Amino acid sequence: MIHTLHKRGMKSTFMYTAGIASIGLAFASWAASNRLESAGLERADRWGIFVGEWAPTFFAMGIALRMEEMRDEEERAYDQHEAPGERISHSAAMR
């Protein structure tokens, strides 16, 4: 899944931004629920926790996408430094 997202142009910075935004959205949903609903503090807490649980997922996906970006950068750097006629597989070069 991460590889497919990376190939389609998804960047790690977008996921990091989504993680930070979800933290703000968690607080905003808690505050809105606490102020606008008569269900009480418990319901507001549930809304805040529900939205707040998205942040770690976004950050984890950002890290995974960053790893894909670094792998691509390493492959490009390796391809630029190889001499003509000396092409070997990337996995063989890593040994």
Image: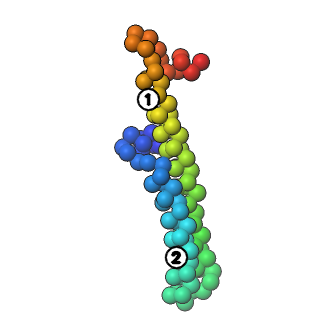
Question: Toward the viewer: 37 or 71?
Answer: 71
- Up the image or down, 91 lies above or below 55; here it is above
Q: Which residue is pictured at 49% across the width and 59% down the height?
A: 17
Question: Toward the viewer: 45 or 31?
Answer: 31
Q: Where is residue 55 in the image (x, y as percent from the top left)?
A: 56, 60
Of the image marks 2 and 1, the number of the one nearer the N terminus = 2
Q: What is the three-letter code of the residue carrying label 1?
A: Arg
Is any atom of residue 54 visible in this view? no
Question: Toward the viewer: 36 or 84?
Answer: 84
Name the quadrant of the C terminus.
top right
- Up the image or down, 84 lies above or below 30; here it is above
Q: Distance between the residues labelled 2 and 1?
A: 44 Å
Front position among marks 2 and 1: 1
Q: What element carries label 1?
A: helix
Q: Which residue is pictured at 46% across the width and 43% down the height?
A: 1
Instruction: Name the residue furthest bottom.
Output: 38
Name the side, left or right, on which 23 lies relative to 6.
right
Instruction: Name the residue furthest top.
Output: 85
Residue picked out by circle 2: 29
Q: What is the three-letter code of the residue carrying label 2?
A: Ser
